[in-house]
Image (spheres, rainbow, N blue to C red):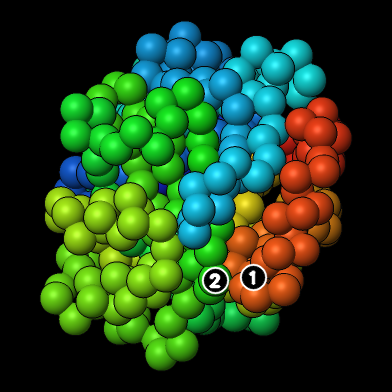
Amino acid sequence: MSPIRTTTIVGAGIAGLTAALALARRGIASHILEQAPALEEVGAGLQLSPNASRILVDLGLLDALSTRWTEPDHIGLSSGISLSHLASVPAGKAARSRWGAPYGVLHRASLQTVLLDAVRAEPLCTLTTGTRIESAADALAAAPADVLVAADGVWSRLRHAVPGALPARYSGNVAWRFLVPFAAAPPFLDPRAVTAFLGPQAHLIAYPLTEIEAFNIVAIHAQSDAPPIGWLRRGDAVTRGRMLEAFAGWHADIRRLLPDAQDPLVWPLFGCPDGAWTDGRKTVLIGDAAHAMTPFAAQGAAMAIEDAALLAARLATATDIPEALRRFEKTRRERVARVRSRGAFNRFAYHARGPVALARNLVLSLRRPEGLAADLDWLYGYRTPE
């Protein structure tokens, strides 16, 4: 029998809430500590690829998610310069058939609400808000437990409790997030697809959020100088001007869309280098606290969800806590490294210019949708080792 009966989880985001549910399904109680007085998810849309949705389905959340998300017919790549279609990957029914789970897009707040409702309905989960945690000692004083799970995000305060963990670093890119109501959307935005528009040193992602009748837009561009450390903030005239400059050579329809963005949020993209995730005793980092990554593979939330599932599996069968945490870290590190590599490749391909961009477009035009889907089998078809 596992010696682990209780965990303390710091952070009630996607990683922390999913971990609490996954642990509860295996008979392990969790006390979640959250510094915010109320849970309010910032940002806009979120992509849940099959490797992540499969875990949420196993947790019994499919019915709740199905009323909120959209399952796009396909994932498309288009030129940001001409708007011409380059390639696509089948999703919708094809995703369920090929990868055994849905590909859904929804508002981040909706996912957090679904997870929070499930946590509150779970007798083995307890949530305390308005609790600021500065150290592992603070967390265990507030909620003593066998294992401490740090799920407090890219700016984790508990990261310093893990020797060898490394702080977040600026990636050289910023993202703009905003919504375009369906009623005001230009025709090039496809309500049946997730579409990535590619251009020199920038790209733009668009997909529908039917629950709020708006398109989620994420415009990412290179910016060499690091913005102030932080998370999301309102874009001022200077930063908006830099965004418009980054997309200046793009198709006129996209250039008309950007200046009209209502209340855009600027999101400096930070990632965590490959440092340690566990102190070798009872503390473990998960999600962005362990391995925050840039969104070029749209896998940040998915990696947090996968972390939660594997951590629960490892702890449920553990006879030795440090060894269980080391096994968790080893398995997840290999998976995260491969996903990071895919993100780095996407960054290069999406932001290519000149002859490289022309070669990219030619190669994509020759690829069949089924072949592109097969390239993603390792990512979307992944199943958490038990």
Q: Which quarter of the image is occupied by the C terminus?
A: top right
Q: Is residue 303 above or below residue 282?
A: above
Q: Are marks 1 and 2 in contact (CB under 8 Å)?
A: yes
Q: Is residue 142 above or below residue 137?
A: above
**Percent coordinates x, y for residue 355 in the rendering:** 72, 73
Residue at image coords 17%, 54%: 260
- The answer to whether 235 appears left or right of 280 in the picture is left
Q: Which quarter of the image is occupied by the N terminus?
A: top right
Residue extending furthest toward the bottom? 225
**Percent coordinates x, y for residue 11 in the rendering:** 40, 51
Residue 309: assigned label: none
Query: What kind of residue is marked 1?
Result: Ala
Front-most of 249 and 42?
249
Residue at image coords 55%, 53%: 79
Mark 1 and mark 2 lie on one chain; the one further toward the N terminus is 2
For disc 2, the marked residue is 200
For disc 1, the marked residue is 352
Residue at image coords 77%, 63%: 359
At label 2, counting other C-alpha atoms closer than 10 Å, the crowd grade (few under 14, some 14-19, many 20 or more) is: many
**Percent coordinates x, y for residue 327 in the rendering:** 83, 53
Query: What kind of residue is marked 2?
Result: Pro
Residue 16 appears in view: no
Assign a secondary structure to mark 1: loop
Residue at image coords 52%, 21%: 71
**Percent coordinates x, y for residue 364 in the rendering:** 75, 48
Assign a secondary structure to mark 2: loop
Front-most of 308 and 92?
92
